């Protein structure tokens, strides 16, 4: 199974391609058409799109994660 995730954070219109194996995070251009473009349109309308991810949380800093906290 590939270990690549496309992420978008609330309050940020950008998308990010996260390649776990390569340990890279790269800005991702939104395609003009296709399934990803449709998902982005749903996001722009206020929706949330989640597929094949069973845990994700955005926190204010890496330090918060390493201290074991999940802030709001």
Image (spheres, grey):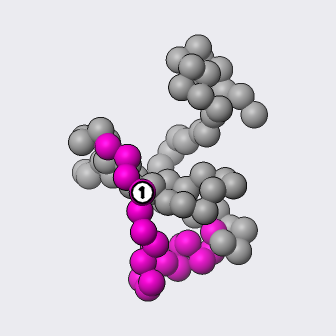
Q: Position of residue 10 (x, y in %)?
A: 67, 53
- Residue depicted at 53% across the width and 41% down the height: 55
At horizontal 42% and vertical 69% (from top left) the residue drawn is 29
Name the quarter where the C terminus is drawn. Answer: top right
Side (left or right) of 23 relative to 28: left
User: Does 69 appear above or below 18?
Assistant: above
Report if residue 4 is visible in the image: yes
User: Where residue 38 appears, x then y in whole percent?
Assistant: 52, 79
Check residue 34 for magenta coloring. Answer: yes
Q: Nearer the viewer, residue 49 or 16?
A: 16
Q: Residue at x 53, y 17 (%)?
A: 66
Please identify the residue farthest to the bottom as the structure is shown.
Answer: 33
Q: Residue furthest right?
A: 72
Could you tell me residue 54's position as x and y percent?
50, 45
Where disc 1 sits, the SS reads strand
Left or right for 3, reference 42 = left
Residue in front for this viewpoint, 40 or 53:
40
Residue at label 1? 27
Mark 1 crowdedness (10 Å alpha carbons): few <14, some 14-19, many ≥20: few
What range of the chain is rendered magenta?
24-43
């Amino acid at each position: 199974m590939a270990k690549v995730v496309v992420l978008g954070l609330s309050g940020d219109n950008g998308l990010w391609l996260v390649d776990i194996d390569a340990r890279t995070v790269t800005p991702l251009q939104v395609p003009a058409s296709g399934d990803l473009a449709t998902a982005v349109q749903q996001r722009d309308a206020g929706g949330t799109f989640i597929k094949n991810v069973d845990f994700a949380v955005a926190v204010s800093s890496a330090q918060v994660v390493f201290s074991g906290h999940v802030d709001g």
